[in-house]
Image (cartoon, rainbow, N blue to C red):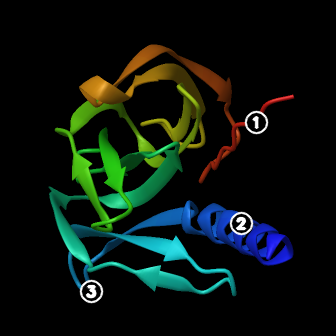
Amino acid sequence: MLKKLVFLGALFAVTTAWAAEYVVEVSNASGSDNIYYRVGLIREDGAIDWGIDTKADEDGRSLGVATDAGTAIMIFRNDEDEIFYKVGAVDTEALTVDWGPKQEFAKGSSPSINLSGTRVVAVYGGTKKDRLFVMTGWLEAARKQINWGGSFQYDDKGRNPAIALGNQ
């Protein structure tokens, strides 16, 4: 009996670990700049059980998304090259995100964002050709906002940047 309980406990622990892994996807509707998102749970076999494709009540392109510890950040730009972000709380039971308001934080193109804990980093192309900029900030998840530091040019010969954030 004890062996069965230990086995069932270990099975439950593995199942719980897999159930805690989720993904958030953002994309444009076909033929438009309407932004949609969906949340999915990663199954043990690696497949994803997706929630419903939901309109984010925003228009934009050059989409990006980052998530950590139940918080998601979406980034996008509009036709005037204004770059915005939205912070949301991920609900893995309802497979939804409760998004906060959009907030402009830069002007440019090709934004990319990443998140680790409360640290946020974003890169984007400037309004002048081939200049790349980086910004760091910290997340206030409860307020659904990011407190940004300054924007710094780090390259004058690049385009279409992407960024990842790591810890040692």
* Pointer 2 local density, CA inside 10 Å: few below 14, some 14–19, many at least 20: few
Q: Is residue 90 left or right of residue 10?
A: left
Q: Is residue 38 above or below residue 85?
A: below
| Residue named by callout 1 | 166
Q: Nearer the viewer, mark 2 or mark 3?
A: 2
- For the C terminus, the quadrant is top right
Query: Is the residue under label 3 in contact with that under label 2 (CB below 8 Å)?
Result: no
Q: Disc 2 versus disc 3: distance between alpha carbons?
A: 46 Å
| Residue named by callout 3 | 30
Q: Residue at x 49, y 20 (%)?
A: 138
Q: Secondary structure at mark 3?
A: loop
Q: Residue at x 33, y 61 (%)?
A: 61
Q: Is residue 32 left or right of residue 146?
A: left
Q: Is residue 82 visible?
A: no
* Pointer 3 local density, CA inside 10 Å: few below 14, some 14–19, many at least 20: few
Q: Position of residue 69 (x, y in %)?
A: 52, 42
Q: Amino acid at mark 3?
A: Ser
